[in-house]
Image (cartoon, rainbow, N blue to C red):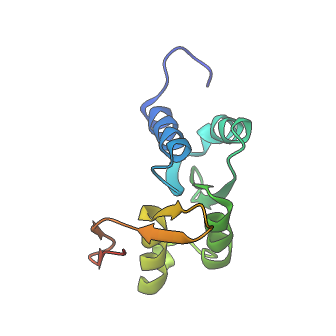
Amino acid sequence: MMTDMMTADMKVLMNHIYEYKKGVRQMVLYTCNKKYESFATLRLERQNIPYIIQPVGRDRMNLFFGRQECLDAIRLMITKPLNQLTPEEDFILGAMLVMTFAYSASGTVSASATLVNVRHKALIIK
């Protein structure tokens, strides 16, 4: 996979990693062909970014990466294919993917999110 021309899939992955490192995202869900697994995991490991892989069929995978707290929740919640999630589980996953956490110097956490459509549900958290 180390060629001069990076595929569109890998460009999207690199952008997700960039956004995570800049703090734009706390967790990312990226679905791609399994042939990119070694490239993607090596890239995440080199940058000390925790991740989880969930197989999707024979030739695809869901790659979750981001804050360890988010991945811990994913391990507990995502125990089946994403298309089999209940509406409540789907909503929680969507909320986790759009949340931005701000940590103050005193250690308190504030969360914010923008208006999004998660399977036809609106989410505004302030």
40 lies left or right of 4: right
Farthest front residue?
106
Q: Give the residue displayed 61% in from the left and 78% down from the top.
A: 77
Total count of labels: 0
> Is 48 on the left-hand or right-hand side of 8?
right
Q: Tell me where residue 82 appears, x and y as whole percent.
A: 51, 70
Q: Nearer the viewer, residue 75 or 99?
A: 99
Q: Is residue 86 visible?
A: no
Quadrant assignment, res 69: bottom right
* Relative side of 70 to 86, left or right: right
Residue at position x 65%, y 42% in the image: 37
Q: Nearer the viewer, residue 32 or 112?
A: 112
Residue 59 appears anywhere in the view = yes
Residue at image position (48%, 53%) is 25
Q: Please, which residue is most extreme toward the top here?
A: 4
Viewport quadrant of the C terminus: bottom left
Q: Position of residue 116 (x, y in %)?
A: 29, 67
